[in-house]
Amino acid sequence: MNSVVLYTEEIDDIELAAEELLSQASGFEFRENSLGILFMDAEAEYEELYGLLREEWSFPIVGATAIGTLTGREGYCRSGISVMLMTADDCRFYVGMTEGLSVDNYREPIRQVYEGLEQDAGGEEIKLVLTFGGKAKGMSGDDIINALDELGKKVKVYGALASDMFTFSNYRAIYNDRIEFGEQVFVLITGNVNPKFLSIKSLSGKANFSYEVTKSEGNVVYRLGTGTFLEALEKSGLSTDKDLVVAEYIQTPFITSYEKPGGIHVEASRNLTQLNRQNGSGLFLGGISEGSSLEIGILNRDDVRSTVKKAFDEIIEWLKTEGTYCKTILCCSCAARFLALGNNGMMEAESYQGRLPEGVSLMGIYSYGEFCPVCDDEWSNVFHNSTFTILCI
């Protein structure tokens, strides 16, 4: 599979933006099957952009709005539009988007889209699922993973939730002429693809905070041990007088450890977003199950720099020795890491800039949550926060 990344910082003059993107793709050789992945500033007029791109490109386009993006050439991009074009003769892409999802109704729409795409694949083995979402209010990214796991297909899933400028109201998922809130787009990939994954938490240690979750529902934690969630924070000297607390805990993400069906042990980061003073609960971006453990990690810039560099050291060495077929790298980094980096937005990009082998393209997104398998002795699909994830195909 070959790929190329296009980028324009233009978001006001959409005709100019489309012209710049199409011009950068002019020398790219398309093969039998192609796909476009597009990340863009939430303020850009996507409908107009798609109409202009569609005049030249007949293949599907998927993606999401983004608070920031990464490219192999530019590095960190605070705004603009980036597009990765993927093309192959020996891989096929089956693409679809759900209708509106809600907390009470997400399993069935996801099942319908997935099984419909599976039928389109005509019995070919699904090697990888890419997915991007404009999460409905009240939903957790875990709901998407759980719905896919319940289908029993045991296919590796990679992707991200859309983001915006922390308004949590303008983020959208993209599929061709649709740009939607509360919907999920899926790409099922068959053929000659052998994905490799890495996920990096960048935590230097853990705070003095460790509890069993004794009462929770989805992404709301009510009780830790014998007390409320808020009481546990106060007991550890980690409380705040604010209710909306994304910024207060951005450098101290919570870590949940739990067991998935089949006995696979999973550890995932979670960002705390809101406290409820009336019932003492905490609202998180990701799900936290009853019976799991909950701790607090410490995120700092030096660890971000060293761990992401180490991950790309591994990827680049692998590309030189075993990954010669790999021409495409997708990255998803949490918007919480974006905030923690402050004015050092290029820090993660510096880990790969000028180091990738010739012919390897890279594009990434800062998201409100990342989908990436964890791969130890056995692998499992996991929804992450505060995590930098890498996919090589």
Image (cartoon, rainbow, N blue to C red):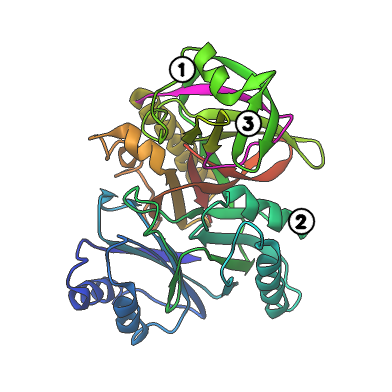
Magenta stretch: give its range: 284-300
Residue 332 lies, in percent from the top left, at 45, 48
Residue 257 lies, in percent from the top left, at 66, 29
Residue at image position (30%, 44%) is: 353
Give me the C-alpha separation between circle 3 and circle 2.
26 Å
Q: Nearer the viewer, residue 215 or 12?
A: 215
Residue 304 visible to the viewer: yes
- N-terminal-most mark, 3 or 1: 3
Residue 197 lies, in percent from the top left, at 57, 45
Three-letter amino acid code at the position of disc 2: Glu
Give me the C-alpha separation between circle 3 and circle 1.
17 Å
Q: Nearer the viewer, residue 345 or 232?
A: 232
Residue highlighted by disc 2: 150
Q: Is residue 308 left or right of residue 92?
A: left
Residue highlighted by disc 1: 238
- N-terminal-most mark, 3 or 2: 2
Residue highlighted by disc 3: 222
The outermost residue toward the front is 278
Residue 327 lies, in percent from the top left, at 46, 58
Residue at image position (36%, 55%) is: 66
Q: Is residue 205 left or right of residue 186?
A: left
- N-terminal-most mark, 2 or 1: 2
Which of discs 2 and 1 lies nearer the camera? The answer is: 1
Q: Secondary structure at mark 3?
A: strand
Q: Is residue 286 magenta?
A: yes
